[in-house]
Each structure stands twice: as C-alpha cells, then as structure tokens.
C-alpha cells in the first residue's frame, strides 16, 4: 500500500511541476547578456534586480516588450456590510 501511495504522489508531483514549467510568466525587466550572441533573461521584477545580475557578467537591462501589467481595476468587495 505504501508503494502505491508513493507512486501516486510521485505522479501528481511530476505533473504539477510540468504544469508550472509550461506557465508563461512575464516580468517587467529583461537582462540582455553579451555571450557571443545576445541572450535574454526576462525574469526580473525590478531594474535593480536586473542590474545586480548583469553587473558581474556584462550586459544591460531593458524593459520587457511582452510584459503586460496586472489590471489596476479595484476588486469588488465580496462581503456585505452588516449594519
């Protein structure tokens, strides 16, 4: 019984990681690294984070052209106010 539970847990974890790996998450800043050909890493939340990464290896930071900021609409309050 323990082996069946282990195998099921392993399968669920594998499919969970695979689903996360295929999710497209865009961040606002890209590091353009100079490694012969230009290599892009668009996984930075702030320009400071990007600059810290390229400071030791060379390159520069630029805004991610594919980044779409989250909607700024205020969420509707889902609870009714009690008087």
Image (cartoon, rainbow, N blue to C red):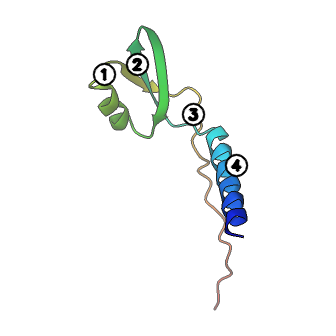
Name the N-terminal-most of marks 3 and 1: 1
State the residue position of label 3. 67
State the residue position of label 4. 15
Dot 1 crowding, Cα within 10 Å, few <14, some 14–19, many 20+: few
Cα distance in 3D space between marks 3 and 1: 24 Å
Dot 4 crowding, Cα within 10 Å, few <14, some 14–19, many 20+: few
For this rendering, which residue is in front, 3 or 33? 3
- The answer to whether the residues at label 1 and label 2 have Cβ atoms under 8 Å apart is yes
Q: Quadrant of the C terminus?
A: bottom right
Mark 4, secondary structure of its residue: helix
Q: Which of the 4 image quadrants contains residue 7?
A: bottom right
Residue at 67%, 66% in the rendered image: 76
State the residue position of label 2. 33
- The answer to whether the residues at label 1 and label 4 have Cβ atoms under 8 Å apart is no
Cα distance in 3D space between marks 3 and 4: 27 Å
Residue at 26%, 25% in the rendered image: 56
In this rendering, is residue 77 above or below 68? Answer: below
Cα distance in 3D space between marks 4 and 2: 32 Å
Q: Nearer the viewer, mark 1 or mark 4?
A: 4
Residue at 68%, 73% in the rendered image: 78
Name the N-terminal-most of marks 1 and 4: 4
For this rendering, which residue is in front, 41 or 51? 41
Q: Nearer the viewer, mark 2 or mark 3?
A: 2
State the residue position of label 1. 57
Cα distance in 3D space between marks 1 and 4: 35 Å
In this rendering, is residue 49 above or below 30? Answer: below
Residue at 33%, 31% in the rendered image: 53
Cα distance in 3D space between marks 1 and 2: 8 Å
């Amino acid at each position: 019984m323990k082996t069946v539970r282990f195998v099921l847990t392993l399968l669920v974890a594998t499919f969970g990681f695979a689903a996360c790996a295929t999710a497209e998450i865009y961040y606002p800043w890209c590091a353009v690294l100079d490694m012969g050909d230009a290599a892009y890493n668009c996984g930075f939340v702030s320009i400071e984070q990007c600059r810290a990464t390229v400071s030791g290896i060379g390159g520069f930071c630029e805004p991610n052209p594919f980044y779409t900021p989250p909607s700024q609409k205020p969420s509707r309050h889902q609870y009714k106010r009690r008087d």
